[in-house]
Amino acid sequence: MKRFILSIFAILITSFSWAQEDLVYILQPFTEQTQVVYTDMEIPFYKRLGEKKMAGKIPAAQSLRVVNVMNSDDEDLNKYMAVNYQEKTVYVEKKNVAFKKIRTKENDFYFRIGAFYLGGEYNNSLLYLTSIPHNANYQTDSFAFPLVTDEGLIDIKVFDNKGLKDITNLIQIDYQGEYCGAESGDSWLYWSAMDGFNQLADLIGWADMDYIAERFIFPTDEGGKSGKIIYEIEHGVLEDDTVDADYKITKKQKTYTLKNGKLNPEFTSLITTLNR
């Protein structure tokens, strides 16, 4: 049976009654340079823009060539894009297609973004992850969690287990601030055949006159320790306001293990312990 797991950070979302059709496309991972999108599930398509009745369904695990991204200030038009399916141009909703696909030895991972429209405004930008196994004996897993920020760009990387037992892949969501002082950082998740998806922690950072950067050091990373996840926070403060000023850098660390799919002890940021 397909698992759909919401992160504990999405408590606000689960307090509402919702369905797939309540989700809306909000961020802009699709640009005029987008050439291919992907289906992580069966999705409807339409022969003409604005039609209410679907013409059919596109199966999961398809790669679709983009004909027109159709980014527009018109909210109704912006919901759709034109793609090539079975040698014909058809229309699909952007919320239903993945903007990124990463293939590993065990799975194809799909990533798409949506949000809820509640109380007259958009709430909780969500990243949706789906793993479709190459081995038909394993089930498809899905996971959704709120993005730390919906500003700037995100980059997604999938790694091996970096030396952690009982998991298969680590997944890094890298938030890249586009201006000084913009929030950045990482969300770290993992996938295993036994547990599906689980979220480890959100790590944040920003840079202005001073900077803060949180990161994880895994066992196979430089400075890593067997069986341990090292959390490190680095704080840099300009010693003066001259052009050639150096940063005075402070680092703190805390060591965790992975137990029953969660960080042990429970993760806590060290930001509040910094001298700021």
Image: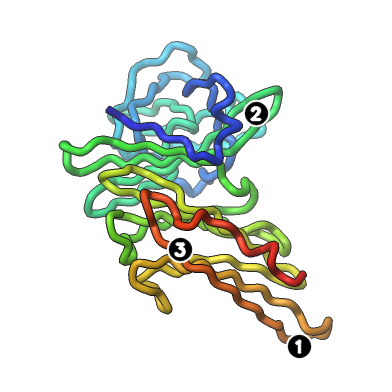
Between the C-alphas of marks 3 and 1, the distance is 38 Å
Three-letter code for the amino acid on which mark 1 is drawn: Asp
- Residue picked out by circle 3: 256
Q: Are marks 1 and 2 in contact (CB under 8 Å)?
A: no
Circle 3 Cα neighbour tier, 10 Å, few/some/many (<14 / 14–19 / ≥20): some
Mark seen at residue 74:
2
Picture colour scheme:
rainbow
Among the two numbered marks 1 and 2 on one chain, the one whose residue lies closer to the N terminus: 2
Instruction: Indicate the position of residue 196 as horizontal and vertical percent values.
Output: 33, 42
- Residue picked out by circle 1: 244
Which residue is located at x 69 percent, y 70 percent?
Answer: 211
Q: Which quadrant holds the N terminus? A: top left
- Tag in front: 2 or 3: 3
Three-letter code for the amino acid on which mark 3 is drawn: Tyr
Among the two numbered marks 2 and 3 on one chain, the one whose residue lies closer to the N terminus: 2
Among the two numbered marks 3 and 1 on one chain, the one whose residue lies closer to the N terminus: 1
Instruction: Indicate the position of residue 152 as horizontal and vertical percent values.
Output: 62, 53
Instruction: Indicate the position of residue 155 as horizontal and vertical percent values.
Output: 49, 56
